[in-house]
Image (cartoon, coloured by chain):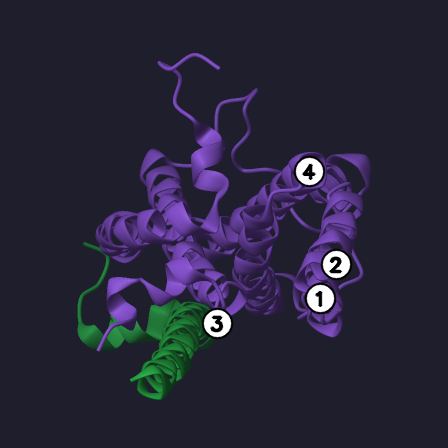
Chain colours: A purple, B green
Amino acid sequence: MSQRLVNWFKFASPASFYPLAGKMWPWFAAIGTVLAAAGLWISFFVAPTDFQQGEGYRIIFIHVPASWMSMFIYCVMAFWAAIGITFNTRLSGMMSSALAPTGALFAFLSLWTGALWGKPMWGAWWVWDARLTSELILFFLYIGYIALTAAIDDPRRADKAGAIISLVGVVNVPIIYFSVKWWNTLHQGASVSLTKAPSMAATMLWGMLIMALAFWMYSIAIALYRVRAIILERERHTTWVAELPEMQR
Amino acid sequence: MNWGSAGEFFAMGGYGLYVWGSFGVTAAALLIEVVLVRQRFSAVRRSLRRELAADRDTQD
């Protein structure tokens, strides 16, 4: 390999990724905090009252970003699963298991805020609609991943099993995304799409996008923090861990 | 500005329970996750430090 190319595989080693993650997470946490403050300000003080749903629509500012994150994190887990199976890198499985609890949390928040929005607008906390049901399946896939990998003692075998559940389960993500098109659902269609102009006021759209970015930064920061804990747990008997400055007296 | 008073802000035009139930649970969930992850990290660091200190003591 040419000397001028960055050697990405260097960072596939837990020993070099651990300090890198330690340097990166505070930046993501700081950017996420600033974005969340701006997003919340827009959500409550800039975005106007909706002409149909009054103030109740403001749930959108966390419901949509949380739903996007729950789907996106699952795709990232599937990406790490594919890398792990192809290159047999140890870090991939650690990244997947660092992301799973955060993904599960966002899937739960998507369902929770959806229920609190559905009750006043549809008159029901829950309906067995294609969008809601496929999101519930996504939540169960996260729980399944966590339970399966926790049940296998050998971490490398747990990673392999987890990688399979991630790669098989990822077919559910496009099903969630297109569910409102493929089936006749109670859930409304996409408010934001890549092919059409968004069907909402500009300030509402900006609030939603900034909140989505804030959740994104939060997810990266928390996953980097968690992966550091996972690296220490799994590499505890190695020399590089014993030589870390924070392990000295 | 959408709100005439703090009371109006908390009432959310009659949707207070739903709006604050959503934002409140989200904020609480993210805070709890941060606390749990920090605890997990400091627990493994503490146990590793103790293990390494014990190793050094037996070598001395």
Residue drawn at x 49%, y 41% as measured from the top left: A12
Q: Give the class, few, some or many, for how many residues have Cα within 10 Å of label 1's Cα (few <14, many ≥20).
A: few
Circles 2 and 1: CB atoms closer than 8 Å = yes
Left or right placement of residue A37 versus residue A211 in this view: left
User: Residue B10's image quarter?
Assistant: bottom left
Q: Amino acid at mark 1?
A: Asp
Q: Check contact, mark 2 vs mark 4: CB within 8 A.
A: no
Callout 2, which amino acid? Arg
Contact between marks 2 and 3 (CB within 8 A): the answer is no
Would you name the residue on which mark 1 appears?
A154
Which residue matches tag 2?
A157
Residue type beneath disc 3: Tyr
Front residue (pair A217, A135): A217
Q: Chain of mark 1?
A: A
C-beta proximity under 8 Å, tags 3 and 1: no
Q: Residue sitting at 19 percent across and 74 percent down?
A: B6
Q: Which residue is mark 3?
A: B18
Res. A189 visible in picture: no
In the rendered image, residues at marks 2 and 4 fall on the same chain:
yes
Secondary structure of the residue carrying numbered label 3: helix
Q: Which residue carries the number 4 mark?
A: A82
Q: Chain of mark 2?
A: A
Q: Nearer the viewer, residue A229 or B3?
A: A229
Q: Residue at x 48, y 69 (%)?
A: A236
- Are marks 2 and 3 in one subunit? no
